[in-house]
Image: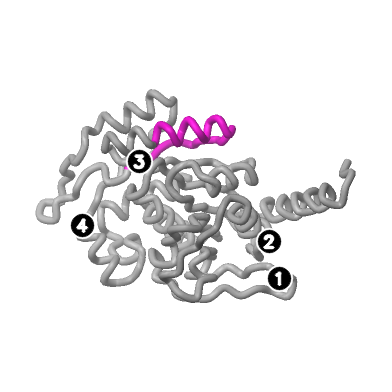
Amino acid sequence: MPTTFEDLDRVIRRKEMDDVLARLGRKYLIFSGKGGVGKTTLSVNLAWTLARAGYRVGLLDVDLHGPDLAGALYLDAQLTADEQGRLIPIQAIPGLWVLTIQHLLTDENQAVMWRGPRKTRAIAQFIGETAWPELDYFLIDSPPGTGDETLTTVHHIKDLAAILVVTGHKLAINDAYKAITCLKRANANILGLVENQASLICPECGQDIEIHDPLNAQTLANKTELKFLARLPYDPKAALMAEKAQKPLVEAYPQSPLSERLRAFALSL
């Protein structure tokens, strides 16, 4: 039982967060050991695919220092609040609601210079004090590594399933192993790993060209006893068309082999 006003406030906030979380459907944390492995691109295309398939999807960016969701979605908007002071997520397309700190900044080049307690409080607000609608899926794009943002998210959402994104480069594999170890110690449920940029799709013949040793990511999965969820190539043509169209690649170039594999993975969640 609460014995102080501070304890009572924590109990009330926890209850409010639990009430919100109960409406958010299946919850997935997209994380990585290092940056540059395509984690945000994966998050955006999974969320977009699920929304286009008729599901109601929430996409939360808990990367406070290097948020990229708004840019990846080509979404320029400012967040507002409802009468109860709760943030109202931006609706990117029918069925897809997005929340990122980018939409709270007046200058896209503004740096967020926050430390631990302020970051953890902000993430708690993004999860539990936001007017999220009833959802089928709730995807969370986290920053690379195992800092406050990732651990705070794992702490607050007990039924979270984490998906590790890694490339076959040995440095990325080493950092991924550390991230897996950390999340396991935090009692997180790690669903498995996705090897991204696993090969290059030749623009001329359409065949996969290996970039790294294909055994590197598989060895990591075996060593950590994680399920190997998907192996995704890099498609330069799809990436170029997505930038030109200013849409996620599953929308800009749906016939791409990469788009097909992304859709298959999204609909398997």
User: In terms of image quadrants, where is residue 231?
Assistant: top left
Q: Residues within 10 Å of mark 4 (few under 14, many from 20)?
A: few
- Which residue does the image show at 62% across and 70% down from the upper left? 88
The structure residue drawn at horizontal position 37% and vertical position 44%, both measured from the top left corner, is 34
Mark 4 or 3, nearer chain start: 3
**Dot 1 corresponds to which residue?**
85
Label 2 neighbourhood size at 10 Å, few (<14), some (14-19), many (20+)?
A: some
Tell me if residue 14 can be seen.
yes
Mark 1 or 3, nearer chain start: 1
Separation of residues labelled 4 and 2 (CA atoms): 39 Å
Mark sitting on residue 104: none
- The CA distance from mark 1 to mark 4 is 43 Å
Residue range highlighted in magenta: 176-195
As shown in the figure, which amino acid type bears the numbered disc 2?
Glu
Q: Secondary structure at mark 3?
A: strand
Q: Which residue is under mark 3? A: 166
Give the amino acid type for the residue marked by disc 3 in the picture: Val
Q: Position of residue 21 (x, y in %)?
A: 67, 52
Residue for badge 4: 236
Cα gap from disc 1 to disc 2, whole angstroms: 8 Å
Q: In the image, is residue 92 above or below residue 42? A: below
Q: Which residue is mark 2?
A: 129
Determine if the magenta segment contains residue 36.
Answer: no
How far separated are the C-alphas under marks 3 and 2? Answer: 32 Å
For marks 1 and 4, the one nearer the N-term is 1
The mark closer to the camera, 4 or 2, is: 2
Q: Quadrant of the N terminus?
A: top right
Foreground disc of the pair 4, 3 = 3
User: In the image as oriented, which residue stretches furthest toward the left?
Assistant: 204
Q: Are marks 4 and 3 in contact (CB under 8 Å)?
A: no
Give the mark toward the camera: 1 or 4: 1
Cβ atoms at labels 1 and 2 below 8 Å apart: yes
